[in-house]
């Protein structure tokens, strides 16, 4: 029968005993740490009937709305339902009279808005969504309901008072009043949203007489377009300049007659712009050569930019256009020598 070697060896026995002792001490320390962690770990509140009643009364004393406890104090609301069946029965148990369900009216909306203002909440839409919806239903918007209740609107929102205040302040600064929103797109959009138009917002701000008079918008028809084109021609003006100087007439011609050239032709006039084709470019180059005019691209561009542009667009380059016309390209230097000779 073999004996354990540790019994005969005192050194080994002492070491084993020390190891077992260290393990037990570590186990005790671990249990102590667990106990300390449990003491610092947050525990759920244990409710009973009396604690629910005390919490309800404390909420009332602090000025909190009992009707909004379901959103602002969910643990209390759930405990009240669990111990008393409903929130209303919990209020009765606390000696309070539950508010009966009331229908919304203008008077109630105004009264609740004044109550909200005294609590200094951040936004009505977040804290009282039903009140905000009722304000929109009875007054058209929450801002108008606040105006009727003489309550300062919510911060950061473009309400009517803020729009009027911004308009008056920026007018005093000397900004251009004829530009919608003084050039500020947010202010212009808010003015249109709250008042319907920039002019109406200026009128509400008492600045309608400071807005410069605008020219009445022209009402275009097919005949009006033709008459305007004929008048433009009779005044000795170039028809090609209409797109630059009268965008309204040019766009109306495209709308009512399909295009500017068609509108000019319908007015009985000859369009000043040519409808270039490759054949027309070649023909014009040959005419230019027959008249003895320069075929150098730089000189030709100064004299007839439309021809040079059409040749580049339709034939690829000025040299290719000359080759297609059976003409020899001439440099500007050679052309200068010929003119001197």
Image: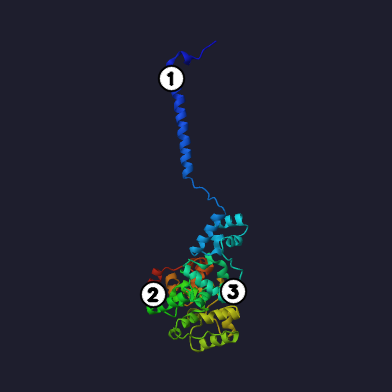
What residue sits right under mark 1 in the picture?
A: 14
Residue 303 appears anywhere in the view? no
If you read the primary sequence from the N terminus, does the residue marked by circle 1 or circle 3 appear first?
A: 1
| Mark 2 crowd level (few <14, some 14–19, many ≥20, 10 Å Cα) | few
Image position of 78 (left or right of 329): right
The answer to whether the residues at label 1 and label 3 have Cβ atoms under 8 Å apart is no
The disc, 2 or 3, on the residue closer to the chain's N-terminal end is 3
**Image quarter of the N terminus:** top right
Residue under numbered circle 2: 339
Number of marks drawn: 3
State yes or no: discs 2 and 1 in contact (Cβ < 8 Å). Answer: no
Query: Residue at (43%, 15%) from the top-left corner?
Result: 10
Q: Could you say whether the residue bearing mark 3 is in a helix, strand or loop?
A: helix
Percent across and percent down for residue 213 are: 46, 86
The scheme the figure's colours follow is: rainbow
Q: Nearer the viewer, mark 2 or mark 1?
A: 1
Front residue of 42/241: it is 42
For mark 3, does the 10 Å Cα neighbourhood hold few (<14), some (14 to 19), or many (20 or more) residues? some
Which SS class for mark 2? helix
What x and y, as percent, mark residue 333? 39, 69
């Amino acid at each position: 029968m073999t004996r354990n070697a540790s019994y005969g060896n005192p050194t080994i026995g002492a070491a084993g005993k020390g190891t077992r002792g260290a393990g037990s001490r570590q186990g005790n320390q671990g249990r102590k740490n667990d106990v300390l962690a449990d003491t610092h770990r947050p525990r759920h509140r244990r409710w009973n009937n009396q604690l629910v009643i005390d919490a309800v009364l404390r909420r009332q004393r602090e000025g909190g709305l009992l009707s909004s406890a379901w959103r602002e104090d969910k643990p209390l609301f759930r405990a009240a339902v669990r111990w008393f069946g409903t929130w209303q029965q919990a209020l009765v148990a606390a000696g309070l009279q539950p508010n009966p369900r009331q229908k919304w009216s203008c008077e109630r909306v105004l009264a609740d808005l004044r109550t909200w203002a005294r609590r200094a909440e951040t936004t009505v839409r977040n804290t009282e969504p039903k009140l905000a919806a009722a304000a929109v239903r009875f007054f058209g918007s929450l801002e108008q309901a606040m105006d009727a209740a003489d309550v300062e609107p919510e911060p950061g929102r473009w309400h009517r008072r803020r729009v009027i205040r911004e308009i008056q302040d920026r007018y005093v600064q000397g900004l251009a009043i004829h530009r919608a929103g003084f050039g500020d797109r947010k202010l212009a959009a808010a003015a249109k949203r709250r008042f319907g138009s920039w002019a109406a917002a200026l009128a509400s701000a008492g600045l309608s007489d400071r807005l410069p008079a605008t020219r009445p918008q022209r009402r275009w028809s097919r005949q009006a377009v033709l008459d305007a084109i004929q008048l433009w021609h009779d005044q000795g003006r170039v028809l090609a300049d209409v797109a630059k100087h009268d965008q309204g007439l040019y766009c109306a011609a495209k709308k009512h007659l399909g295009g500017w050239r068609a509108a000019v032709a319908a007015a009985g006039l000859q369009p000043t712009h040519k409808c270039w084709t490759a054949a027309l470019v070649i023909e014009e180059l040959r005419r230019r050569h027959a008249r003895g005019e320069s075929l150098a691209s730089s000189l030709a561009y100064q004299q007839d930019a439309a021809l040079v542009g059409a040749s580049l667009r339709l034939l690829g380059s000025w040299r290719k256009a000359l080759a297609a016309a059976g003409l020899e390209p001439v440099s500007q230097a050679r052309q200068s020598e010929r003119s001197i000779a």
